[in-house]
Image: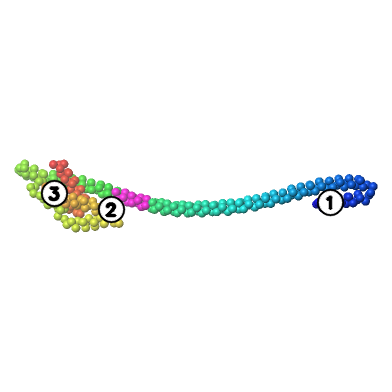
Amino acid sequence: MKRAVWLAAMMLVAAGCSDTSEEADGQAEALQAEEEISGLEEQVDKLETDLERERNRGRERRDEISELKKELSEAEAASSTELEEELAELQEEMSELEETYDELADTAASLEEEAASLASEKETLKDNLSALEDEVETLTSENSRLTAEAEAVESAADSEEPAASTSDSSEESESGTSSGSLDNVIAGLSASEVESEIRNKAEADWPDDFIMQEFVIDEQTAAYNKLKNLTISTEVEATQLDRAYRDWGYDFIMVEFVFEEQMKSHENIN
């Protein structure tokens, strides 16, 4: 750029020198041209300085942009790693929650099955209770019949007593007392035979229902032990126990029930 300006100035100077008449004017113009050239050179220098400065700034900007891109890339990579780790943790937590849910579902299913089983057992017990209530009602009716029969027998026995009997013998007959201890028909039974008969009857009455079998065996055994240990002190007690045993055999619950009811009725009417 400086060379082009300088050549132009020289051409102007040469053109001025060829015309001698205009030498003074040409020198003045040459000086003015040199001044203009000098000014232009200063502008060119300034422009070149500014251009170099801008280029340096451009390089700095490019470096800054490159650094920012690098930092951005690193940040994205770090964010991606953190997100992947967080995602892995969430997936693991989800897996644990699914396992917990499956366990709870299994527990709920087990509880539902148990509830259904208990409901079925409850219905069975209700049916058994209903059957026992019917049996009690039957036994109550039978007891009323037996009580009536006993009253009729005792009434007939009282009417057949000799009129000449003494008051002491009459009292002894009415109370059925005896000076000695009388035989207990239940105590004379074989314990092993009783146990076998109770078990066989429970199994026959309640097949496959082990709850009721156990209940009946326990109740029958308790009744047997109570009757076996009775102390029979009157003829009436011996007679009624023997009669109840003949009527109900190894059903000791009924033997005990009938015997006790008969003795209560005997006490009430004497």
- Of the two numbered discs 3 and 1 in the rendering, the one whose residue sits closer to the viewer: 1
- Residue type highlighted by circle 1: Trp
Q: Position of 138 compared to 263: left or right?
A: right
x then y, percent, for residue 268: 16, 41
Q: Nearer the viewer, residue 112 or 17?
A: 17
- Residue type highlighted by circle 2: Met
Q: Position of 110 compared to 94: left or right?
A: left
Q: Nearer the viewer, residue 211 or 81?
A: 81
Q: Which residue is mark 2?
A: 212
Residue 6 numbered tag = 1
SS at badge 2: helix
User: Label 1 crowding class (10 Å Cα cut-off): few <14, some 14-19, many 20+?
Assistant: some
Q: Earlier in the sequence, mark 1 or mark 2?
A: 1
Residue 231 numbered tag = 3
Tell me what residue is drawn at x 29 percent, y 56 percent.
207
Magenta stretch?
A: 114-129
Residue 243 visible (yes or no): no
Residue 177 visible (yes or no): yes
Q: Earlier in the sequence, mark 3 or mark 1?
A: 1
Which quarter of the image is occupied by the C terminus? top left
